[in-house]
Amino acid sequence: MTAPVLDSLAALADPVRGRLLVALERHELAVGELAAVLQLPQSTVSRHLKTLVEAGWVASRADGPSRRYRFAPDAGSETRTLWKAVRGPLAQLPTAANDQARLRAVLAERRAATRAFYSGAAGAWDRLRVELFGARADLLALLALLDDRMTVGDLGCGTGAVTDALAPFVRRVVAVDHSREMLDVARRRLDGRDNVELREGELEALPVEPGELDAALLVLTLHHMPDPDAVFAEAARALRPGGRLVVIDMAPHDREGYRAEMGHVWLGFGAAQLETWFQAAGFGPSRYTLLPADPAARGPALFVAAAAHVAVGSAV
């Protein structure tokens, strides 16, 4: 019988599998994206991924009709220890720099699709949002935030619908979006709201001071983000210890057309995926709840997930 650690070593015998692990170490990627990064046929990439999954190096999940893959050794496992030993040499392979450059290009292409959609949709966004999800869907999760002492971040505020609903009930709302066109619409909608601050910036690099927020919202925004890990990490930085992050988005679905039509990067999220991102960013256990369906909505089911930011050195 072969020891598990030897099976893990055997999986690294081919340099292609090492290159795949380096690419997947920080990002969850589809087969087509990995093929572009390594400049290999998708069939070759799929074959090597199968070996890595069987050896416990990689995990996958369904994302609509396709699958996404991620680096997945358990913390503290022999596989994780082995990775620390081989990661440096793998990064020094002659192909490593080119792989990383192509990986950045793949992630930039994800972001470009989202930007193209938002830049052209700002004027029609409210109508499109109501058609897909119903006029009040984004308000169903706000009851937990009705504390007039709070400063709340509306991250990915779009045209300001959530900010407008929230502003009367809290001390201050910091509304952030990368789209100048969206912010222009929000500014007109929020005219007269003296406790709202509109800030232009990326969710992966928030224009927010550390600990400035008591709570933060990501409402129908995360599915556009190419790097959710970075979004969650920035939200954690912006929140005070104990502050809550609330995510409202689509449950897993198979509407592949949304990628081309609206720049969606992700086809919904399940509870396990959200919990992984919450934990990696330093949040405590999360709660994931499907929201009641709006009969007038044409879009997928929505969920709300929330967790508190854990202070350094405190128990969860």
Image (tube, helix red, strand yellow):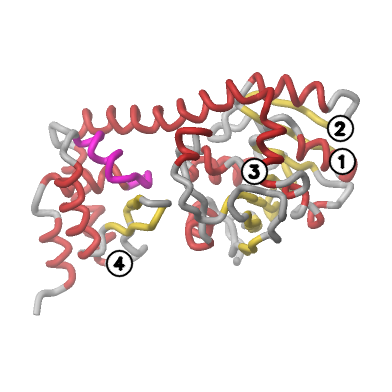
Q: Nearer the viewer, residue 87 or 17?
A: 17
Which residue: 58% across, 56% down?
A: 283
| First in residue order: circle 2 vs circle 4 | 4
Q: Which residues are magenta?
A: 25-38
**Circle 4 sits on which residue?**
77
| First in residue order: circle 2 vs circle 3 | 3
**Circle 1 sits on which residue?**
171
> Disc 2 vs disc 1: Cβ atoms closer than 8 Å?
yes
| First in residue order: circle 1 vs circle 4 | 4
| First in residue order: circle 3 vs circle 1 | 3
Q: Amino acid at mark 3?
A: Leu
Crowding near the residue tagged with mark 2, few <14, some 14–19, many ≥20 C-alpha atoms within 10 Å: some
**Circle 3 sits on which residue?**
132
Q: Nearer the viewer, mark 2 or mark 4?
A: 2
Which residue: 16% across, 37% down?
A: 40
Which residue: 42% across, 32% down?
A: 110
Crowding near the residue tagged with mark 1, few <14, some 14–19, many ≥20 C-alpha atoms within 10 Å: some
Q: Amino acid at mark 2?
A: Asn
Task: State the SS at label 4.
Answer: loop
Relative image position of residue 155 (x, y in whole percent): 66, 38
Query: Distance from label 3 to label 1 (Cα)?
Result: 31 Å
Task: State the SS at label 1.
Answer: loop
**Circle 2 sits on which residue?**
195
Q: Amino acid at mark 4?
A: Ser
Query: Distance from label 4 to label 3 (Cα)?
Result: 44 Å
Task: State the SS at label 2.
Answer: loop
Relative image position of residue 96 (x, y in whole percent): 20, 34
| First in residue order: circle 4 vs circle 3 | 4
Relative image position of residue 147 (x, y in whole percent): 86, 51
Q: Is residue 35 magenta?
A: yes
Horizontal placement of 277 versus 187: left or right?
left
| The N terminus sits in image quarter | bottom left
